[in-house]
Amino acid sequence: MAVENVIIIGSGPAGLTAAIYTARADLNPFMIEGYQAGGQLMLTSDVENFPGYPEGVLGPDMMADLRKQAERFGTRYLTKDVTKVDFCRGGVTPPLHVVYVGDEKFQAKAVILSTGASARLIGLPNEKRLMGKGVTTCATCDGAFFRNMEVAVVGGGDSAIEEATFLTRFCTKVTVIHRRDTLRASKIMQDRAHANPKIAFIWDTVVEDVMGEKEVEGLKLKNVKNGETSTLKVAGLFVAIGHDPNTKLFKGQIDMDENGYIKTRDGMKTNVPGVFACGDVQDHVYRQAITAAGSGCEAAMDCERYLEAEAHKGH
């Protein structure tokens, strides 16, 4: 069986940047991009904060550009999902890692993990249909599109209150909808939000659905204590109820934190030699396309140095 220099699992900005760098280093990378190739940006309409696109760019178009660039330097793709991994933890020289796609088995000297994270959604009938048309999971990415409009944020933790506070830069009013009667956010963030005249709160309430044909026009709400229903007219819904890293596949194979994010150290190295991680799968702080791309570059360079050192061991 042919042994790959490097297999990249996942094809968002982090994975594709890693592919560009490893391909240009003549490592002939093999990317298993997944059936849902392109990552979270495939759900984003306009991207205005990625350098190099002065007019902005549609998320899927940007991912197509990155994919084309990686392909130009020789990246090979398999548009299927990885079903299992078996990382070598030493004892074999050189250490080979095994990646399975169903019954197919691939071996590699190095693996770069860039499977990203998925924003938790509420699970409403029209939520996915209106994603990118007023429903969003990222205030930093999309806040500026709602200038002089009224929007709602769902959630009660730090990220929800941070998003609400950020949105007041653009929006005339931000309504925080929370299923409980107190926030989970840190006290300093709560105080800041309560002091902000543009932020309003609706307590003990859940969103039952999003209204609007082509874009968000309002929300159907339900009070969880008395069962009363109401509507709220808004142009945008920001869902801020957390993210889940896509790491189930690597459980028991690699060190993760208590929330399931892969731990990296000394660059993008994991605790397993020859296995690297980049993007939202190991970053729960920034979660931007540009930071993911930057970490993809780091992972590729760490990988290149590792392979070079391993090659010299044999001499």
Image (spheres, grey):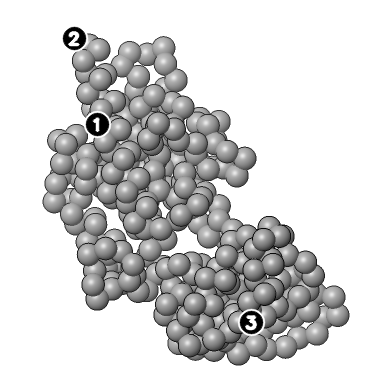
Q: Are marks 2 and 3 in contact (CB under 8 Å)?
A: no
State the SS at label 3: loop
Considering only vertical position in the picture, is 131 above or below 66?
A: below
Look at label 1 and name its amino acid.
Glu
Query: Disc 3 designates what residue?
Result: 197
Direction from residue 140 to residue 295 in the image, left or right: left
Dot 1 or dot 2, earlier in sequence? 1
Q: Considering depth in this image, is 7 or 291 the residue closer to the camera?
A: 291
For the point 33% across and 13% down, the residue is: 93
x, y (%) of residue 86?
44, 28
Mark 2 neighbour class, 10 Å CA radius: few under 14, some 14 to 19, many 20 or more: few
Considering only vertical position in the picture, is 78 above or below 63?
A: above
Look at label 3 and name its amino acid.
Pro
Considering only vertical position in the picture, is 19 above or below 271?
A: below
State the SS at label 1: helix
Look at label 2 and name its amino acid.
His
Closest to the camera, between mark 2 and mark 3, is 3
Query: Disc 2 designates what residue?
Result: 315
Dot 1 or dot 3, earlier in sequence? 3
Q: Quadrant of residue 182?
A: bottom right
x, y (%) of residue 199?
63, 79
State the SS at label 2: loop
Query: Disc 1 designates what residue?
Result: 304
Q: Is residue 149 visible?
A: yes
Q: Considering the image in quadrants, where does the C terminus appear?
A: top left
